[in-house]
Amino acid sequence: MKAEHLAALLPQHSLFASCSEDELAAIILHGTLQTFSKGKDIVTQGDEGASLIILLTGTARISMVSSNGREIILDYAEPGSVIGEIALLDGGERTASVTALEPVSGLRLSRHSFETIMAEHAGMALRILRELARRLRQANSTIESDRAYASGPRLARFLQRLSLAGAADGRLRMDLSQSELGMFAGMSREQINRQLGAWADAGIVAIDAGKIKILDSTLLSEIAETAD
């Protein structure tokens, strides 16, 4: 794998998005290619976090089990996503599990290799700190704003997060069951079913064989910003 290929995979706010080709080449040199079959955990909540993984192909679900045993879906990882960086940086346990939704490949970087690269490329450390600070600010903003919204607007906001950028047909980044969407949006399956049915009747979304498409993104955006 070449540095320019890795650079093309990394999304705008990836932990390594601002890296130079030399820095990305060092990551590739020190990394180990791994593959995971569908349903396998890439990382597991509670395990020791001695490495991170850059997802190269496939998609994965990021989830955690709360203290009361409830599974909460936090996000979905796609090619270019960095997995497991929190535990690698602070030396603690994995805060969430990441499960392959299809065959997945990734580049694993150990803590020792990561620290070696940081020592050789000092400028990376400051850029990574800035990106982590941006993520923390964004996470705090998202948590506070989601608390202020009722279930309908909250579901609209989560559909927007899952929407496929630039897709003219309103496709989502991945096909989710209503139960999975409920775990992602913090709603019951019944609430999801009722709300999606109402939106389908109104022409806001379409549901075909369990797949959701956004038909009226403008109206969905208006719903997403309605506080009650």
Image (cartoon, helix red, strand yellow):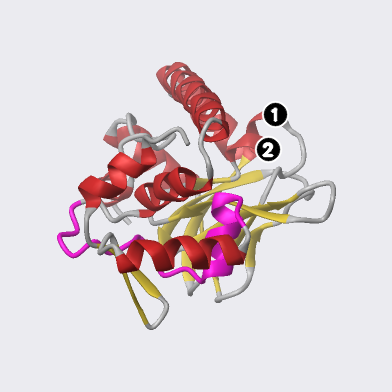
Question: Residue at the spot x=68%, y=48% of the render?
Answer: 96
The reply to whether callout 2 and callout 1 are in contact (CB within 8 Å) is yes
Vertical comparison of 89 with 211: above or below: above
Number of disc labels = 2
x then y, percent, for residue 56: 40, 58
Checking the image for residue 78, the label placed there is: none
Q: Position of residue 179 (x, y in %)?
A: 59, 67
What main secondary structure does the magenta stretch of the protein show?
A: loop
- Viewer-nearest residue: 192 or 94: 192
Q: Amino acid at mark 2?
A: Ala
Structural crowding at the residue carrying mark 1, measured as other residues with C-alpha within 10 Å and reported as few (<14), some (14–19) or many (≥20): few
Tell me how far mark 2 sits from mark 1, CA to CA. Answer: 5 Å
Few, some or many residues within 10 Å of mark 2 (<14, 14–19, 20+) = many
Q: What are the residue bounds of the magenta stretch?
A: 166-187
The percent coordinates of residue 150 (x first, y second) are 53, 41
Disc 2 target residue = 87
Task: State the mark number for residue 90.
Answer: 1
Tell me if residue 200 can be seen: yes
Pick the residue in front: 144 or 63.
144
The amino acid beneath tag 1 is Asp
Image quadrant assignment for residue 226: top left
Q: Quadrant of residue 175?
A: bottom left
Q: Residue at x 57, y 59 (%)?
A: 182
Observer able to see residue 34? no
Q: Secondary structure at mark 1?
A: helix
Q: Residue at x 29, y 40 (%)?
A: 222
Is 210 left or right of 12, judged from the image as shown? right
Q: Is residue 177 magenta?
A: yes
Left or right for 1, reference 32: left
Residue shown at the point (41%, 39%) measured from the top left: 26
